[in-house]
Image (cartoon, rainbow, N blue to C red):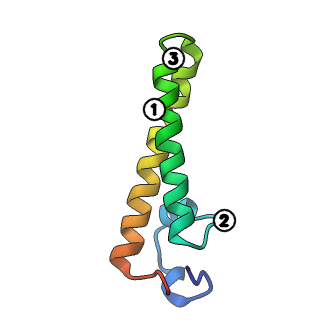
């Protein structure tokens, strides 16, 4: 659980706060990361049959963003039990 009202959270970089917008738990962030990766992978394979789906592969970037955001919060020790 994230305490978004704490002084530690006030000092996080903008990209971290934007990445965790609307989420408070690590479990939710991991679920979004997993969903983005799986959906982008499926869309990439499906794009061989229907090319416009190639644009959904941009979700790999979202999955990476979630991964580095989660890692940053882990390293900062901001998750609360």
Residue 74 coordinates in the image, percent (x, y): 37, 74
Residue 71 coordinates in the image, percent (x, y): 36, 66
Q: Residues within 10 Å of mark 3 (few under 14, many from 20)?
A: some
| Residue identified by numbered label 3 | 47
Mark-to-mark CA distance, 3 and 1: 10 Å
Reading the chain from its start, which is encountered first: label 2 or label 1? Answer: 2
Q: Residues within 10 Å of mark 1 (few under 14, many from 20)?
A: some
Q: Are marks 3 and 1 in contact (CB under 8 Å)?
A: no
Q: Indicate the secondary structure of the residue bearing disc 3.
A: loop
Q: 77 or 46, which is in the foreground?
A: 46
Q: Judge whether 24 appears above or below 54 on screen.
A: below
| Residue identified by numbered label 1 | 41
| Residue identified by numbered label 2 | 22
Q: 51 or 14, which is in the foreground?
A: 51
Q: Residues within 10 Å of mark 2 (few under 14, many from 20)?
A: few
Q: Judge whether 42 appears above or below 3 on screen.
A: above
Q: Residue furthest right?
A: 22
Question: Which is in the foreground here, disc 2 or disc 3?
Answer: 3
């Amino acid at each position: 659980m994230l305490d978004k009202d704490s002084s530690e959270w006030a000092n996080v970089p903008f990209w971290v706060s934007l990445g965790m917008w609307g989420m408070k738990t690590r479990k939710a962030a991991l679920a979004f990361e997993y969903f983005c990766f799986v959906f982008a992978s499926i869309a990439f394979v499906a794009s061989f049959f229907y090319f416009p789906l190639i644009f959904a592969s941009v979700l790999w970037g979202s999955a990476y963003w979630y991964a580095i955001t989660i890692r940053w919060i882990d390293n900062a020790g901001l998750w609360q039990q």
